[in-house]
């Protein structure tokens, strides 16, 4: 676990916001620069839901080779068990680190196991002061505004 955390690149900070449609798969429209500037891979950071607050987040940017997708997508996974849908809620993200490149897998089980490992790495890394400090309302706002 610590080995993986040590491999994290220094902070890459950007913001994305979008309206959630059931799952947190975001439409590619509006994220062209994020998609082109970031190599396919798994990133982590903080998510903010407008009416609920902050959640730890791990995110895939890429083509999902296991599913042979033709489109590069952004798929944030909020590390929290929600009891109800948050349809229509506004989502803001700050990406603070990188975990690994995108990969293919011999089975769905091994892909899912890897995604859970990514989730644990993100959970632990986001406890570190280096990354925990970005869970901050003002910071989200300033990052967001600087891109308007
Ligand atoms: C943290 C995370 C890491 C992922 N890593 C990979 C990966 O390395 N390779 C891949 O093909 N898909 C990867 N995915 C994408 C999954 O294939 C996809 O999210 C999942 O299977 C659901 O796809 P669906 O919503 O189209 O059903 C990752 C997703 C997440 C959230």
Image: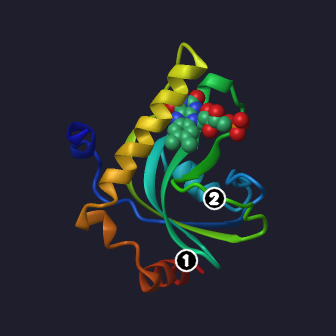
Which of 143/133 is in front? Answer: 133
Q: Residue at x 55, y 77 (%)?
A: 147
User: Which percent across, then down, holds residue 46?
Assistant: 46, 64
User: Which percent across, then down, holds residue 115?
Assistant: 49, 36
Q: Nearer the viewer, mark 1 or mark 2?
A: 2
Residue 4, compared with residue 85, is above or below; it is: above
In terms of image quadrants, where is residue 100?
Answer: top left
User: Which percent across, then down, holds residue 124?
Assistant: 31, 52
Label 2 secondary element: loop
Categorize mark 2 by other alpha carbons within 10 Å: few (<14), some (14-19), many (20+): few
Counting residues from the N terminus, which is met first, the one under dot 1 or under dot 2?
2
Whether the residue under disc 1 has CB within 8 Å of ligand 1: no
User: Which percent across, then down, holds residue 107?
Assistant: 57, 15
State which image quarter holds ligand 1: top right
Q: Residue at x 26, y 38 (%)?
A: 1
Q: Residue furthest front?
A: 83
Quadrant where the C terminus sits is bottom right
Q: How is the model colour-coded?
A: rainbow
Can residue 40 be spotted in the picture?
Answer: no
Residue highlighted by disc 2? 82
Label 1 secondary element: loop
In terms of image quadrants, where is residue 49?
Answer: bottom right
Q: Residue at x 51, y 54 (%)?
A: 79
Residue highlighted by disc 1? 147
Q: Residue at x 65, y 55 (%)?
A: 32
């Amino acid at each position: 676990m610590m080995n993986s955390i040590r491999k994290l690149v220094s902070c890459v900070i950007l913001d994305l916001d979008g309206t959630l449609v059931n799952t947190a798969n975001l439409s590619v429209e509006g994220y062209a620069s994020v998609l082109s500037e970031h190599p396919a891979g798994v990133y982590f950071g903080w998510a903010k839901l407008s009416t609920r607050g902050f959640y730890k987040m791990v995110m895939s940017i890429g083509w999902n080779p296991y599913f042979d997708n033709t489109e590069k997508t952004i798929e944030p996974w909020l590390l929290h068990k929600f009891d109800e849908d948050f349809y229509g809620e506004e989502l803001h993200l700050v990406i603070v680190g990188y975990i690994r490149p995108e990969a293919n897998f011999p089975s769905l089980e091994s892909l899912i196991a890897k995604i859970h490992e990514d989730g644990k790495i993100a959970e632990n890394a986001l406890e570190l002061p280096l990354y925990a400090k970005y869970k901050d309302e003002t910071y989200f706002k300033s990052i967001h505004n600087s891109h308007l």
